[in-house]
């Protein structure tokens, strides 16, 4: 297992993901984790991640005792400055931050740079630089602007690089990480999704025994995979509640229900609550108020189902589809970590006293998907784009009405279908239609129309925190627009959203 000490969320996650992609388990701990926590994991190697902080301005530092563990350590960017700083080298304040590709000249091919050419393209994100090496270290590479771009102490197995091997712009980054993980740390390949899925199932079985578990199905991949793993582990002691809010995508209730029922799963409670949601949303225009109503109604219905339909079963656990980045970001990333995203998991009233179980809590999104495929869930369902908890409620600007929902569901289904057919869907992080309740004039046949607008949103992103609009083939956009206007009653204009996040959010409300 390779431990990544986290000095800046996104950097640490990317490193852990790359290591897992090499087939080795990798976990993240806060950058200021105690030596006891670190030793308890018995890592084969430790990586100190990059960070937006500076070691010269009270940035977080690892416990100095990690240098006495006899474990190989790789410092990346901030991590390499942290190591230099703690081992009494000198770090110089950078004037400004520089980003971008640079040419790395390798002067000594140590175990980390083994197999690389003398010149390699690497990606930098400089702030500070090291200008005096700590004792025992030798320079191994430099660039035009960075004297100590890489240096190491092979004897103690301490390696440092100023550039980022975890980003794809560093062309041989994978080789560098692989040199560290296998060549230097001697880590074993112990991370593949088949083994991971069966380990999760046996752990769940052992932990839950005969207990009854309730899980809320949202239509999203995470909860579906969590439910499927639980079903494999405890069979009909699992009770799934799928609230049909009326705010789901076209055909979603049917496809998700079928995926579960076709595996022999009996305890699926599909609660039809469309009219409740519609009635409560009538006349409400304010986005926050809409979100509040949807969230509260959901919890209320979920709770009622538990009390009424499941009263004969001793349900003691609530399962959720929390994934690894959710847990790391919202829990212990160390006191320095910036809060990145607030989560929207179902929170039940405390008096319900259910214990939480999170079957996919150690997995990244793409790993959850691979486990889903291992479990034989339909490909399209497993690779579906993220969908927000409040559903189409946040994709209709202003009041939610039945008519608007119907229009939006149809337009969205056409958009998705065309993207899939063109092979574009899986190149996109998230794509959907939104309804703008503004009427404009059009002409159809001989008649003048006065109807709504549909906005198409398609974005590229890694985590939804920032996003760029997806550069879409024009012919495809044209086909989608013609099909929507031609077949969805109530729409006479289609717009394509070319706004980045920030400043715009991905969803409309
Ligand atoms: P925004 O609109 O904030 O969305 O740019 C970023 C990502 O988060 C998703 N999202 C949500 N997911 N409950 C969720 O489960 C929510 O209330 C919610 N709001 C936004 C959004 O779809 C995008 O992937």
Image (cartoon, grey):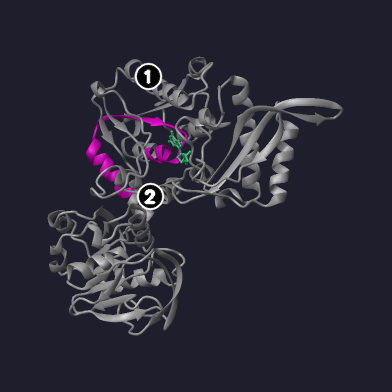
Can residue 1 be seen by looking at this rendering?
no
Dividing the picture into quadrants, the one containing residue 121 is bottom left
Q: Label 1 vs label 2: CA separation?
A: 30 Å
In what element is the residue under mark 2? loop
Can residue 58 be seen by looking at this rendering?
yes
- From the viewer's perspective, is residue 73 above or below residue 417? below
Residue at 61%, 50% (x, y): give it: 424
- Residue 308, x across and y down, in percent: 35, 15
Residue 154 as seen in the image, left or right of residue 234:
left
Residue at 36%, 17% (x, y): give it: 304
- From the viewer's perspective, is residue 73 above or below residue 267? below
Dividing the picture into quadrants, the one containing residue 157 is bottom left
Residue 187 versus residue 99: which sits nearer the camera?
Answer: 99
Q: How crowded is mark 2: few (under 14 residues within 10 Å), some or many (20 or more)?
A: many
Please name the residue that numbered disc 2 is placed on. 364
Residue 192 versus residue 235: which sits nearer the camera?
Answer: 192
Residue 369 as seen in the image, left or right of residue 411:
left
Residue at 81%, 30% (x, y): give it: 443
The answer to whether residue 353 is magenta is no
- Residue 445, x across and y down, in percent: 85, 30
Q: Quadrant of ligand 1?
A: top left
Circles 1 and 2: CB atoms closer than 8 Å = no
Residue 469 as seen in the image, left or right of residue 135:
right
Q: Which mark is residue 300?
A: 1
Query: Over which residues does the magenta segment extend?
Result: 198-226
- From the viewer's perspective, is residue 168 above or below residue 435? below
């Amino acid at each position: 297992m390779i431990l990544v000490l986290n000095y800046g969320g996104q950097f640490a996650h990317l490193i852990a993901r790359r290591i897992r992609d090499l087939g080795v388990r990798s976990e993240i701990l806060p950058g200021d984790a105690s030596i006891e926590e670190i030793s308890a994991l018995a890592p084969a190697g430790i990586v100190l991640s990059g960070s937006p902080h500076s070691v010269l301005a009270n940035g977080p530092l690892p416990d100095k005792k990690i240098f006495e563990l006899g474990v190989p350590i790789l410092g990346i960017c901030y991590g390499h400055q942290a190591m230099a700083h703690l081992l009494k080298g000198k770090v110089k304040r950078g004037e400004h931050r520089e980003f971008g590709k640079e040419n790395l000249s390798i002067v000594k091919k140590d175990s980390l740079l083994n197999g690389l050419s003398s010149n390699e393209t690497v990606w930098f994100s400089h702030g500070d630089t090291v200008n005096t090496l700590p004792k025992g270290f030798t320079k191994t590479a430099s660039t035009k602007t960075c004297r100590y771009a890489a240096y190491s102490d092979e004897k103690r197995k301490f390696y440092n690089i100023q550039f980022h091997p975890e980003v794809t712009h560093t062309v041989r980054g994978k080789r560098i990480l692989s040199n560290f993980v296998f060549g230097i740390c001697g880590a074993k390949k112990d991370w593949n999704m088949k083994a991971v899925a069966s380990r999760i199932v046996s752990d769940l079985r052992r932990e839950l025994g005969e207990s009854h578990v309730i899980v809320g199905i949202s239509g999203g991949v995470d909860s579906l995979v969590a439910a499927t793993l639980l079903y494999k582990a405890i069979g009909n002691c699992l009770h799934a509640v799928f609230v049909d809010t009326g705010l789901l995508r076209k055909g979603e209730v049917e496809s998700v229900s079928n995926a579960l029922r076709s595996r022999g799963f009996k305890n699926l409670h599909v609660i039809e609550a469309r009219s409740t949601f519609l009635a409560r949303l009538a006349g409400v225009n304010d986005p926050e108020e809409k979100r509040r109503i949807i969230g509260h109604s959901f919890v209320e219905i979920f709770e009622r189902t538990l009390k009424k339909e499941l009263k004969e079963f001793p349900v003691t656990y609530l399962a959720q589809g929390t994934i690894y980045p959710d847990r790391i970001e919202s829990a212990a990333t160390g006191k320095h970590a910036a809060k990145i995203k607030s989560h929207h998991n179902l929170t039940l009233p405390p008096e319900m006293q259910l214990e939480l179980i999170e079957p996919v809590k150690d997995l990244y999104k793409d790993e959850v998907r691979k486990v889903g495929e291992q479990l034989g869930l339909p490909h399209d369902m497993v690779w579906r784009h993220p969908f927000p908890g409040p559903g189409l409620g946040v994709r209709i600007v202003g009041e939610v009405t039945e008519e608007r929902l119907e229009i939006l569901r149809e337009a969205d289904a056409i958009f998705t279908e065309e993207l899939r057919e063109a092979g574009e869907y899986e190149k996109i992080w998230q794509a959907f239609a939104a309804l703008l309740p503004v009427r404009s004039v059009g002409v159809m046949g001989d008649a003048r129309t006065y109807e709504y607008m549909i906005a198409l949103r398609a974005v590229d992103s890694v985590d939804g925190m920032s996003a760029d609009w997806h550069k879409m083939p024009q012919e495809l956009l044209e086909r989608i627009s013609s099909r929507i206007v031609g077949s969805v009653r109530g729409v006479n204009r289609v717009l394509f959203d070319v706004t980045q996040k920030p400043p715009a959010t991905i969803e409309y409300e």
